[in-house]
Amino acid sequence: MIAAIRGTHDILPGEVDKWQYVERYARTLCERYGYAELRTPVIEREELFAKGTGESTDIVQKEMYAFTDKGGERVTLRPEATPSMVRAYIEHNLEHTLPAAKLYAMGPMFRYERPQKGRYRQFHQLDVEVFGMEDPAVDAEVIDLAWSLVTGLGIAQAELVVNSVGCPACRPAFQQALLAALGDNLAKLCGDCQRRSATNPLRIYDCKVPADQPIIDGLPHSVDYLCDACATHFAGVKSHLDAIGIPWTQSHRLVRGLDYYVRTTFEVLGQALGAQNALLGGGRYDGLVKKLGGADKAAIGFAAGLERLVLALPESAPIGTPARAFIVAIGEDGRAAAWTLLRALRQAGVPAQMELEARGVRSQFKRADRLAARVTLIVGGDELARGEVTLRDMATGEQRAIARDAVVTTVRDAVASTVGNKL
Ligand code: AMP
């Protein structure tokens, strides 16, 4: 047997119902907030992420599925969506063609990470991006969408954490203060932190090594070094959140593992998830469009991990599979009549099934139970002779005869009233 690759997973029927529910909810919400879907390829030029995600990130240094293709070009499976969204925004001039540059995408991402619960090598993200606006209301709208996604799915014990990491004007002073505060302690930190101190010192706050934590906890906070413009902006984001009752906490440790963030950063954590507890994360990345060859545009976005949203979904989520009908056929004539009825029901939009291979009545009813059929139609010699079929409500066991001509409309009404997957 050839097994699936480590860190990848099949999403089996049954489990898929939860995925479809989460995906449907995410789409509905994005569209309600005015976002349009953009679909980009899963394979891109390697340099897009080296430049976009950043050379100093773990993603680019250690985790990309990059290779040389048969034409000699360096390509990679995408490790995240943002650089692709920015590329497409620039390449198709979306600034001029879209009514509002508010975009979302959903799909698989690939990172060669150490797999564990909630962390995979192929995983899926909902990605949301807004281009060309820097007002704090935009940050707050994006955070509102992220928070509404998590809470609307019924995920309890979620926590929204926000921070501001400043801009190119104020960050150098903060980085200096950070390195000065580290002083001799730098040599006591892990190898990764020492490397980060040279490439992107802010990323020291991301370190998870337990022995490093007491030192990192004592380091300065970026919010104490913001320039006036960044401080005003961050205050504006928080007051917009307060005005609509979204609860946030502030953490100086929230710097995010990517190079491009400026000003606002945020994450929503799911307390029930264990070590991999970030449901989603994002922030502002005002310099990235220009860096990737576009105009000097502000931008902000977030990515949510669909695996983690599915894991955190409560038992009570209204996932219900669509109600369906099952036809039990008795005898050769019954099977022939059932075959045409099956087609008529499906043409009328009713999910319907029958046993296509001849089976006994008991075995057909067993199948109807396993399929959780809402109603069963019994089509047999006696009923046919009277121009009727018998309709059995599988929940109550109640049976009644219906005229053959009325079957399709009756069943359609019975099933339509119980179709699941409502938002
Ligand atoms: P990032 O793109 O690293 O900012 O991550 C955004 C979100 O994607 C995280 O909060 C997770 O929910 C999810 N995520 C990131 N990496 C993985 C992974 N390897 N496996 C599953 N989910 C992930």
Image (cartoon, rainbow, N blue to C red):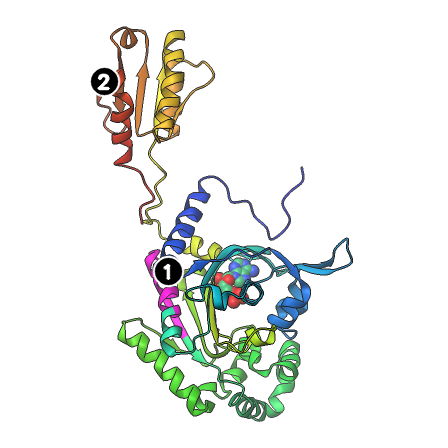
Q: Is residue 371 magenta?
A: no
> Which secondary structure lies at badge 1?
helix
Q: Please tell me which residue is depicted at 43% across the width and 56% down the height of the picture.
A: 309
Q: Please tell me which residue is depicted at 35% across the width and 62% down the height of the picture.
A: 33
> Which secondary structure lies at badge 2?
strand
Q: Is residue 278 visible?
A: no
In this rendering, which labeled residue sits more in front, label 1 or label 2? 2
Quadrant in which residue 58 is drawn: bottom right
Q: Find disc 2 in the rendering and name its residue.
A: 402
- 341 vs 398, left or right, is right
State the separation of the CA atoms marked 1 and 2.
45 Å
Q: Vertical placement of 151 versus 385: above or below?
A: below
Q: Amino acid at mark 2?
A: Ile
Q: Find disc 1 in the rendering and name its residue.
A: 149
- 396 vs 35, left or right, is left
Magenta-colored span: 142-161
